[in-house]
Amino acid sequence: MNHPAEQRIAPAAIRKTIEVQAPRERAFDVFARRMGEWWHKDHSLAKDTRQVDVVIEPRAGGRWYEKGEDGSEQDWGKVLAWDPPHRLMLAWQLTREFEYDPDFETTVEVTFEDRGPMTIVRFEHRDLERMGEGAVETFESMDGGWAMLLGLFKAEAERA
C-alpha cells in the first residue's frame, strides 16, 4: 500500500464541448486550416517578432507550428491523425514552460459531429501528467487558456 505522502494525483484531461453554428466542413476547416485567423496572438513562442500565422500541415506526420512576422518558425508539435471533416489529433510538444521539446508529447484530439446546421466540437487535451511536477497547476492554467481559444475559434467559424 502506498503511503499517502507518496501518492500523486494526475490531472484529468481538459475536455470541452461546444456547439458551433456552422456546417462540419467549415468548422473543421477553420479549426485545422485557418488556426492562425483565430489563435490569440499573445499565445506565442515568438520572442523578437509578432506571430502572423499558426499552421497545421494537412497530413499525419505534418508539422504544427507558428510563423513570425520576420519569417521565423516555432514548432509546437505534429499531426498524429488527419481525418477531415471528422477528426484531428495533434501532438502538443510544448513543455510546462511552453518550450518546444521533440521528445515530449501530450495529445490534443478534436472531433467534429454533424448536427444539421450546427457542429458539435469535442476537444480533449490529455496526457497532462507528462508535465511532471506542477502538472495540476499547468492543467488549471491551460484549461482556462483552451476555453478562451475555443471561444475565439467558435466566433471565427460562425463568422466565416
Image: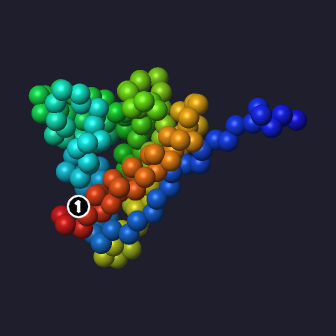
Q: Residues within 10 Å of mark 1 (few under 14, many from 20)?
A: some
Q: Which residue is mark 1?
A: 156
Residue at 29% across, 68% down: 23
Is residue 43 visible from the viewing direction of this image?
yes
Q: Nearer the viewer, residue 90 or 125?
A: 125
- Residue 148 location, x and y as percent? 35, 55
What scheme was used to colour the molecule? rainbow
Q: Nearer the viewer, residue 108 or 45?
A: 45
| Disc 1 secondary structure class | helix
State which quarter of the image contains the C terminus: bottom left
- Residue 81 location, x and y as percent? 41, 43
Residue at 31% across, 29% down: 75
Residue ranking furthest to the bottom: 116
Q: Where on the picture, by quarter, is residue 2?
A: top right
Apparent side of residue 159 relative to residue 154 in the rendered image (left or right): left
- Residue 34 location, x and y as percent? 22, 50
